[in-house]
Image (tube, rainbow, N blue to C red):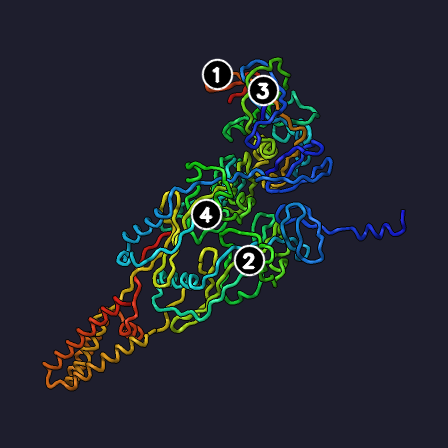
Amino acid sequence: MPKGFPFFAKELRLNTTRCPQCGFKAALLTESDFHTCSQCRALFRVFGGQSVSEQYFRHEPDDALAWGALIGLLDSEGVAVPAAATAISFGYHPFWFAELDNGSTRFKTAGSALNGYPQPSVPPPGNLEFPPPGRSFPQPTIAPETFLAQAEVPVRLRLLQLPLYLINFELPGQQCQATVSGCSWQVYLTKIPNETGIHISSSRLLFLGGYVALLLLAGTLAPNVFWRSSLVALILLVAWRLEISGDREG
Amino acid sequence: MWELAEGRLVPREVVHFSGSGDIFLPFWYASFIINSPDGLVDDTMSYMKMCGSVKTAVASTEAPFVFIPAFLLPPPQSIRLGRNMTVRFPSLQRSPVRDLPVEPITVAEVDVPALAELILLSTLVEERRNNPSFLVSFSVDLSGVRLVSVSFKREGNRMIQPEMNLEV
Amino acid sequence: MATIVFKCPHCGGPFECAEGDRSAVCRFCGVTSVISGDSGVHRLLIRERVDLNAARAAVRKLLAAGGDARESASSFSFKEGTLLFLPFWRIRGIATGWQWREKETFREEVEYDENGTRFTRTVKGENERSFSLVAAPLDLSTPAGDYSPYGQMPVGLAAAVLKCEALDYRETAARATVVDPLKGIAQARQEALAITRVGGNPDGTVHQEARVRISSEWLALTYYPIWRLLFTRGGRVYPVTIDAVNCTIIRCQFPGEEQRERFLPLALIAMVLLGWTTMPAAGAALTALSAYLLKWRTGTLDAPSIIKLLAGTPKRSVGVERG
């Protein structure tokens, strides 16, 4: 036997892991975290010895629709004061989704970008796809083992990329945050905001100011009670008509 | 003989037992060992002791057998029939008749251990079944699982086996 | 987990694999076989019976029929509609096993005091222990994911009575969104077993043990069709979920009309100013009358309510809501 043979054999020893898609014992042929299963050709990654398949929900971003879903929900919940968006940002956000050996599942964010925003507690329904070649998604910053308890053993671990809109908005007197899922336009809110503030629009203020000024003018300039009452009644009727027509236009 | 497995019929060897009758009813048949806090039960004598049987004629050191009905039967009836077959320790003779119809097999082999455990539990004396630590530790190991069939006689809607005093 | 037995294509020996596995090693010859197909899980589809137009018409009908939203039913405009197929696990079989329960018991005892007054008191009795064999048929449909955004669907009955066909993924995915199952078989089995526990966990149970398994199991993924429609008004989006089999609206939430006092605030201002510009006594009297009217109309006289009324802040009435 050649002298160098044992050394050569040692060099050839390959690390293997279970393919998260087909379960095949796949050899890890590259030095990076990215691997291809030699059986089913699925792309998968390895985090701390754990093979992970990455999947995403296909979505075409539409900020207006996401904002519409949020104010539509507020509207339906009876929040009558107007909400104003201060910032809307769309992005894919990584979540760990583990199926454990006892049949239960764990789902938690794998990044820190969602800090402060309401988060989905279960994976949303949708059509999951494997990322096409060349398309990259945000990398997880939270290791998979940190979100699982010590005794929990995942039989399948997935990194799900969720299309989420992070929205900052304000209602009179309060700043709020919401997350809208691009999968089903589901809105995540910590709670439906209370209408604590009082909101008076500038046009309304102008209308009321003009109305009061006209009434004061008519009240002080009118020569007697009859004229005063008549003028006040006339101004009231005109203002009421304006109010009704304004509603119709609005 | 065909077995209905995964929605398909697959061939299976069946040993036909006992004589007079006009239909064969299939049973899964296996020898068993019971592991329980009261010790290992691996012969007919100790099994009889465990289930409080007063029958001593068949007491022996041979491995006991459990019968699990393999044909379509409502679950409570199936357990009752399996229980009766098991505790009567029938001495089965190969049947000379082979051309009798056989009821289709609907219970898959994969379900035999769970059903066997249930049937054997139902044969035990009540004091044991009311003891949770006994129940939790109770387990059954089967060996030599095979299909047998026993001839029954049709009487109206019923099927009877006079030698073993059984009725379905 | 159910096991499936195959004949090794290399040596002919039998080998087993767990349901859902895609490869298995033969224990006789060591050759790995890749398993293709669906490994014993039937994928069935309940075909939709309602098209997009009928779904839209159902929403219009609902809006026109109910609630305060009917006045503005035509102001909601249809934006888009998607047909979705949601997967449900269907498990049929027989739940077999045993359960043992220890329960506290109490009995009433009648006693008489020294005055001869009759009274009863509750006395703790011996704990009741019961053993029962479980052998019950099982037929459960459970969502293979979280479908709360879409509402509750009565799929169990539908899957039992409607005609199912084998899912042709390519054909279905070309015309609809086929949602992926995210709940595993093991979790669905646990749910199925949990509902079979006879009597649940009645009051007074102090100790309970059970071992129940599913035998004669038949497992399928049933895909159920729903329409997901988006309606808009003034930039707001209102999603609606419609059962694509029987056209019932599973979930929607349309707002009611905004209700605003138009005449009262203007009249009160006019009345107060008329009084104060005439003479102080009239001003005081009409201010008091205004306060009375405000209290009668709004039920309160606190400053925010008065400002809201004068500012014309609307109140929302109940709209059309399902699910």
Q: Nearer the viewer, mark 4 or mark 2?
A: 4
**Residue under numbered circle 1:** B155
Position of residue C26 relative to residue C151, above or below, is: above
Question: Is residue A214 toward the left or the right of residue C178 in the image?
Answer: left
Position of residue C207 relative to residue B21, above or below, is: below
Question: What residue is shown at x 69% (from left), y 46% (from top)?
Answer: A25
Instruction: Tell me, for residue A161, which label it has, or none.
Output: 2
Q: Which of these two is toward me, B33 or C127? A: B33
SS type, badge 4? loop
Kindly identify which chain the residue marked by label 4 belongs to.
C
Please say whether residue C174 is visible from this viewpoint: yes
Distance from label 4 to label 2 (Cα)?
21 Å
Distance from label 4 to label 3 (Cα)?
54 Å
Q: Nearer the viewer, mark 1 or mark 4?
A: 4
Position of residue C270 relative to residue A58, above or below, is: below
Kindly identify which chain the residue marked by label 1 belongs to.
B
Question: Is residue C307 toward the left or the right of residue B6 in the image?
Answer: left
Badge 3 crowding class, 10 Å Cα cut-off, few under 14, some 14 to 19, many 20 or more, is: many
SS type, badge 2? strand
- State the image coordinates of residue A238 (x, y, percent, origin top left): 18, 74
The amino acid marked with disc number 3 is Val
- State the image coordinates of residue B87 (x, y, percent, origin top left): 60, 25
The amino acid marked with disc number 2 is Gln
